[in-house]
Each structure stands twice: as structure tokens, then as C-alpha cells.
Image (cartoon, helix red, strand yellow):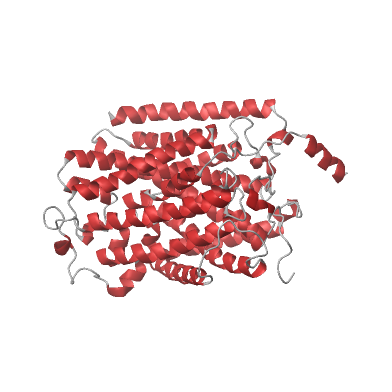
Amino acid sequence: MSNATASAADTVKRVSLLRILGPGHVWALGVGIVLVGEYTGWNFAADKGGTLAALIICWVIGLLYTSVAMIDSEVTSTVAAAGGQYAQAKHIVGPLMAFNVALYLVFAYTMLEVSNAILIADTVKSYAGDGFTDWHYKGIIAIVIVGLAALNYRGVLMTLNVNFVITAIAYLAIIVLFFSVQPWSQGTILKLNEMVTPKNALPYGWIGVIAAFHWGIWYYLGIEGTTQAAEEVRSPARSLPYGTMAGMITLLIGASLTWYICASLMPWQYLGFTYYPLLDAGKLTGSKLLETMMFTATILAALASANGCINDAARAWFSLGRDRYLPPWFSAVHPVYRTPYRSIIFLVPIALAFAFIANLGQAITFSILSGVLHYTFMSINIMMFRNKWPLGTIQRGYTHPFHPLPAIVLLALCVVTYFAIFLGYGAQLTAMVVFYVIMSLWFHFYRYRYVKRGDQFTMPWPKPLGY
Amino acid sequence: MWIMIANAGWVLAAALFLWMLYDWFRVDTTYSEATLTSSREGEIEAVQESHKV
């Protein structure tokens, strides 16, 4: 019976995702998702610990994400499948971990998409003036989420070409702003020595620096999303490490420039409060041209991020369906556009519902929480990967250096970040963990019976060491 | 201007969502479920996936 079914399936013409992307698209996906973090979010770290804390966190969290990028590049250049870290977890740790990782991914990206839509609507509202009602506000949210979903539905190449262009414009805007404020001449426009003094650099001391870890994540949250393109890049072993590392370098430079501009123009009390640090920096220069440029760039950065998030969340959801972790109905691929079209459409009303009821702070926090849970998994995952399949037993597209140091650094920084989140959003942290525990129980006791257990492991690897 | 854009946003969002629903219906009624869900993980051509060390 099962042989007959297998034969029937073999005769069906396979429809799969289109393998068409290059390293530039991987860069556009990763940096596109993250760059909005320079335009809003990171600056709330200043509220927690002062302007200097925001800089310390920029580099310390940069270390966390450099570890993420290195670890991810090695594993994903070997497990090149849609779903990214979900497929990694499935092969290296096991199905229950994989199910949880996929949920982290879907939540992190959907909440990030929601945050971006809210940010665009808030930005427009701040310029729209009187008469801009809640109806209009929601109209902006609706067109952002549905319009980008339609773009994703239509095909991955156009989606990421668009992302490349708008991400590049938003990044160039930071560079242009940096040179426009004459960074070589402190005192002309920038006044860092007045804004950051020994008295106010760390207003709450080192506990403020720890608390700032929460929002520091926002500098780089989402760079690991590059791996979701694994099944659609022409050469995963080359493109994924190259695109991810180039993206990380781009972001480290962008984050440092952003801090320098904003810290030199705004006192920490305002920097930690505003939703638009770079847009406000543009305003504070007194140039209408720079203000307009930063307004446009804020919207483009948020659009690029939402666009990439829809791409990634849909692929994680699609992968769950393909392995029957969710109904296989979700694993349909559009025969013409070659996209996971049912997953894309399914997530649209969910994103709209959250965007209409949640506020920006809550949406960002849910996204950050799911992200940190995900990074914790990655540190454990790479250690298991190296133990089960040591170097030389399988071919890797990229091998990250100094193992296990990056994994240990990553795990330690994740622990500190949990503590920081607990300080500010303890109830949300607890609620989210309870949610994942309930979902795990549902998967273990109910859903796993529908999974074809042998079919889910697709990598033709040798048996792991010790098994 | 923004009010006009926001109103147009509602119309455009509704039109795009309806287009996606229409296309979804058209695809689902044109192709068999076996074809649409025939994608398999691991069907990749790149050299490193052969895992010959």
C-alpha cells in the first residue's frame, strides 16, 4: 500500500521553490530585516541605561550576533533547506526542538512585521496632521501588510530585488546623514561632549547597562533570517555565509554611525524616549532636505524589514507543513510563482490582527523574546552539531573559527538578555515561555502522531558519532 | 495628501487581497493537491549537499 502511494507520488511532477537567488539577495534579506532597528528600537536602550550604555550594548550585542552569524553560516551551509534553523534543529537536536524553533521563527518575524507596519503608520501619522483618524492609520497598516504579502506571493526574485534597492537607499541615507553633520568637526553641528558627560553617561550605573541588553537586541535582530533563503539560493554553501557575514559587517558599521549621530544631537532622556532617533537627528540638523530624506528612509527601512519578515515567516510555516508538523496543506507551492502561497496568505490576517490591537513596544518585545529563545537554541545546536558530526565527517560550506568560544559567548549573552527582559517585561517573558510549553505538549501528545517519522530527515549524512 | 493615500491604501489592500484569494482559488482548482504539495526538502543540486568528503 505504502509502495503504491510512493509510486504515485513519484509520477507527479514535482513543484518546488525556485532556486534563483544570489549573495546580494541574501544580503538584502538579512540587512533588510534588520536595518529598521537603527531607525527605531535600539535607542530605548538609552532609556534603560543612558547613551553610553547604548554604545556598550551596540558592540556587546554585536558580539552576540557575530557569533550567531558565524554559527549559522556553518550549519546552514550544510543543512541548506527552507525553514533555516528549523531544518537544522530537526536534523541535529530532534523534532520537538525543531517544532519550537519554527514557532520562534514565525513569532519573531510576524511580530517584527507587525512592528514595522505600526512604525510606518506612526511615522505617517506624525506628519499627517489633523483629520488623520484611526481609520486612516489602519489603512496604512493594511496596505503595508497586504501589499508586501502580494509582492511575496508573486515571486521571491522580485521580492528580494525590491528589498535590495530599498535597503540600499535606507543604508545610504545613514551614510549621507553622517557626512552631512560634519563628524570631523565636533561642535559645528554635533555636540557629543555636551550630550554625554561623565555625570550622565551611565545614569543608572552598570545595572542600567544590563537592562539595556533588552533593546540592544534590536540593533541586529533578524540577521539570522538569511538562512530562510537556503532552498532558493543558487549556491547555498557560498551565498549564505558570504551574504550573512557581509550583512553583519554592514550592520556593525551602520549601528556605530547611528549611535554617533544620535548621541551627539540628543540628550539621553530624549534619545531613550523618541520613536524616531534618526528622523529626529535629520530634523535637528535644521535641514529640510535631510529631514525629508530621513523620513523617506525610515519608511523604506520599515518596508524592507516587513517584506523580509513575510518571506521568512512564510517559509518557516511552509516547512512545518511539509514535514506534517502542521497540516501538509500549508506546504503547497505555487506552480507558476513558485512561492509557498498558502502560508503567505494564511499569515496575513494574523499579522493584521496583531497590528490593529498591539502597540509597538509589546510587538517588539514579543519579537525580541522569540529571537533570544532562538539564539539560545543555536548555541546548543552548534555544540551538538560538532559533537555528532566532527570536522571531516561531512562536507561543510563554511567552518567557523574558535569553536566552542562563539557558542559559549552566545549562550552567556543570551542568559544576560533574559535577565534584562525579565527586569522590564517579566510578565510577557513568563507568558511566552508558558505558551511554548503548552505548544510543546500539544506537539508531543497530539500532533507528532501525524508525522511520517522517516521522511523528515532528508540530509544524506553518515550516522552521528556515538549512535 | 496622507489622508488620500490612507484611503487609497484600504482600496488597494482590499483589491490585492481579493486578487490573492482569486489566484489561490484558481490554482487550487487547476492543479491537483498532490502536485501542489509535491515539494520535498533536500532536493537540491548544489555540490556540497552530496556530502562526499
Is residue A281 visible from the viewing direction of this image? no
| Residue A357 pos. (x, y %) | 42, 45
Q: Quadrant of the N terminus of chain A?
A: top right
Nearest the eye: A459 or A274: A459
| Residue A98 pos. (x, y %) | 62, 57
State the residue lying farthest toward the right: A1
| Residue A43 pos. (x, y %) | 30, 57
Residue at 24% x, 70% y: name it: A203
Q: Is residue B50 left or right of residue A218?
A: right
Residue at 44% x, 61% y: name it: A65
Q: Is residue B6 left or right of residue A111?
A: left
| A298 w.r.t. A335: above or below | below
Is residue A332 visible from the viewing direction of this image? yes
Q: Quadrant of the C terminus of chain A?
A: bottom right
State the residue lying farthest toward the left: A188
* Image quadrant assignment for residue A134: top left
Nearest the eye: A340 or A396: A396
Residue at 14% x, 56% y: name it: A185
Residue at 58% x, 59% y: name it: A75
| A37 w.r.t. A411: above or below | above
Nearest the eye: A234 or A231: A234
State the residue lying farthest toward the front: B53
| Residue A119 pos. (x, y %) | 35, 45
